[in-house]
Amino acid sequence: MTTRLVALVLLCPMTGTAMAQQAKVTTLMSKDLAENPAKEVTNLLRGSQDVHVVGRNASTTKPAKFLVVLVKDKGAPILTLVE
């Protein structure tokens, strides 16, 4: 559920040609949760070339970066596309 919600939040602002472009996503860390061995936390750094309808970049000289934190089932894919 959390993974799908985050994927939906990341994909909703993209339209037209932006969806056709491959976004740059860098995995910063993936670690098992000590409290629940069946879950893991993953930190991603998201490319800033997408058009987002909520919020704005506070800098006029540097692109924005998005830090994504996911708590998901261990070994589950980060993104599941649904039709």
Image: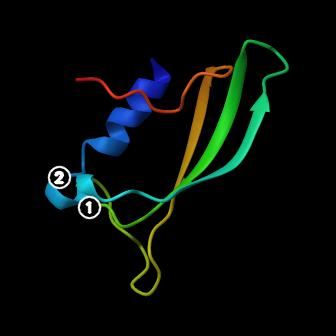
Q: Residue at the far left: name it.
A: 16
Q: Quadrant of residue 22?
A: bottom left
Give the vertical position of 70 relative to 62 (above or below).
above
Crowd band around label 1 with a 10 angstrom C-alpha radius: few (<14), some (14–19), many (20+): few
Q: Position of residue 32 (x, y in %)?
A: 79, 26
Q: Quadrant of residue 59?
A: bottom left
Q: Looking at the rendered structure, which numbered label has been put on residue 51?
A: 1
Q: Residue at the far bottom: name it.
A: 61
Which of disc 1 and disc 2 is earlier in sequence? 2
Q: CA distance from mark 2 to mark 1?
A: 8 Å
| Residue type beneath disc 2 | Thr
The residue labelled by disc 2 is 15
Q: Position of residue 51 (x, y in %)?
A: 26, 61
Relative horizontal placement of residue 62, taking residue 10 as reference (left or right): right
The residue drawn where x is 66% and y is 37% is 42
The residue drawn where x is 18% and y is 60% is 17
Q: Position of residue 76 (x, y in %)?
A: 59, 22
Describe the element under mark 1 as helix, strand or loop.
loop
Give the vertical position of 71 relative to 52 (above or below).
above
Relative horizontal placement of residue 60, taking residue 67 as reference (left or right): left
Marks 2 & 1, CB-CB < 8 Å contact: yes
Q: Position of residue 52 (x, y in %)?
A: 28, 57
Give the vertical position of 44 relative to 63 (above or below).
above
In the rendered view of the protein, which quadrant contains the N terminus?
top left
Relative horizontal placement of residue 32, taking residue 27 as reference (left or right): right
| Residue type beneath disc 1 | Val
